[in-house]
Amino acid sequence: MRSLTLALTITMLCAVPCVGQTTNEVTSAQTSAPAGQPGQSTPGAGTRVTLDRVVAVVNGDLILDSDLDEEARMVAFQPFGDRTHATREQLIDRLIDRHLILQQIRLQPPQPINDTQLDAELSALRKSIPECAACDSDAGWQSFIQAQGFTLDALRDRWRERMEVLRFVEARFRMGIRISQAEIDAYYNSTLLPAYRAEQATPPTEETIADRIQEVLLQKQVDKLLDDWLTSLRAEGSVKIVKPGEELP
């Protein structure tokens, strides 16, 4: 199952208008610029300059090698949770899922995330990244962003997109889910207590962590619904992973 955190790790997806090319590389147009400009090296007429490589096509939208690189680098901005490096296949799956969600969002565009909401999220993010001890200052925050290979504007675009995706998932899957007291009791007794016993640790009372258990169980249900929905979107749409050396139809 795809976890929600994994599926929604932020990136700005690049949809280059080049569907229909017969190669798995995104290329520049043939050039015929005047040669001999001082201090310039100008490709000759008809020169084919490779800019990027297509790794997947999702209902006509392209996912590029550069998107995978950005996705891998964005892990530095994950405030909590697993920061291990994903495999190439995991990155591709992650970006395919996000493309599918964004395509659904575009069918009924919601109220946009405004700058005030975005600034509040980024302000909280700055305080929650352990590796960024200097992020309490604007200069330190800028330096950290640049060290990951991004500009502040690029990060803002990606984080705004992340907020839009999370809001969509919340509205579509989370609102109708109800966790019963019996489910909380069962999780506490069958999952948490054995785990504490295995560590020979004293468990907290159920009352003190009931809200956390409810959140965990709620998240599990959201993950399952999201996973099933994304699987159906893949089956109903056109999703192709392009292997190295393979040409697009």
Image: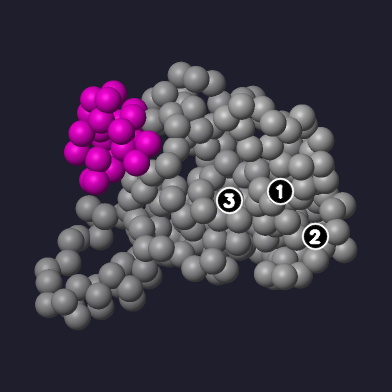
Q: Which residue is mark 1?
A: 49
Q: Which residue is mark 2?
A: 23
Give how far apart the Cα atoms at labels 3 and 2 are: 17 Å
Q: Check contact, mark 3 vs mark 2: CB within 8 A.
A: no
Q: Secondary structure at mark 2?
A: loop
The segment highlighted magenta reads 123-147
Tell which of 64 and 89 is nearer to you. 64
Q: Secondary structure at mark 1?
A: loop
Give the label, 1 or 3, closer to the camera.
Answer: 1
Residue at (72%, 70%) from the top-left corner? Answer: 245
In the rendered view of the protein, which quadrant contains the N terminus?
Answer: bottom right
Label located before the other in sequence (1 or 3)? 1
* Mark 3 surroundings within 10 Å by alpha-carbon count, few (fewer than 14), some (14 through 19), many (20 or more): some
Give the label, 3 or 2, closer to the camera.
Answer: 2
Q: Which residue is mark 3?
A: 66
Counting from the top left corner in percent of width and height, residue 216 is at: 40, 58
Q: Is residue 172 left or right of residue 129?
A: right
